[in-house]
Amino acid sequence: MRVTIKFYGIFRGVLGKNKFVFEIKNEDTVSLRELVNKMTDDIPKINKVLIDPELEDPRPNALILVNGKEISVLNGLETLIKDGDEVVFISILHAG
């Protein structure tokens, strides 16, 4: 399963690029929560700016879209992600 992941704002600065194609083997679907966990395991430097350490949740730090829809109108972190989907993380943190 291949998922396109895009990062904007501070996330792009931390990663040095804004787009990744993330591959998850032996899965037809995963929840967004599982995808975030796998992604932060594979890309540890994003963990510090994406995941709120107290809540262990990305939502306080990012607006998250799945195929153009904000996850609060879907199923939140339990939204199922399938092959070919696009997940976008837009930083709500501001530097300056």
Image (cartoon, helix red, strand yellow):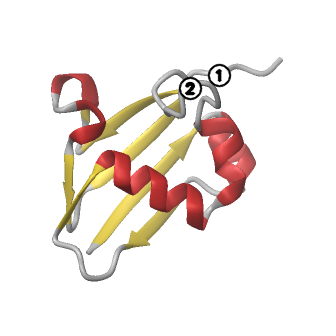
Assess whether mark 1 and mark 2 are in contact (beta carbons under 8 angstroms).
yes
Name the one closer to the observer, 39 or 6: 39
What amino acid is at disc 2?
Answer: Asn
Outermost residue toward the right in this view? 96
Number of dots carrying numbers: 2
> Dividing the image into 4 quarters, which one contains the C terminus?
top right
Left or right? Give the position of 51 relative to 83.
right
- 19 vs 36: above or below: below
The percent position of residue 30, horizontal first and vertical second, equals 24, 59
Distance from the alpha carbon under mark 2 to that under mark 1: 6 Å
Residue 51's spot in the image, x, y percent? 58, 36
Q: In the figure, 45 relative to 48: above or below?
A: below
Instruction: Identify the amino acid type marked 1.
Output: Leu
Pick whichever, 26 or 8, lies toward us: 26
Instruction: Name the residue rendered at 22%, 74% in the picture.
Output: 27
Name the residue nearer the viewer: 34 or 65.
Answer: 34
- Residue 28 location (% of width, % of height): 16, 71
> Are there few (<14), some (14-19), or many (20+) residues within 10 Å of tag 2?
some
Report the quarter where the N terminus lies.
Answer: bottom left
Which residue lies at the image location 36% right of the left edge and 54% below the top edge? 34
Snapshot quadrant of residue 83 = bottom left
Which mark is drawn over residue 61? 2
Q: Secondary structure at mark 1?
A: loop
Q: Nearer the viewer, residue 9 or 76?
A: 76
Task: Identify the residue position indicated by label 1 in the image.
Answer: 93
Mark found first going from the N terminus, 2 or 1: 2
Left or right: 50, with 22 as reference point? right
Q: Secondary structure at mark 2?
A: loop
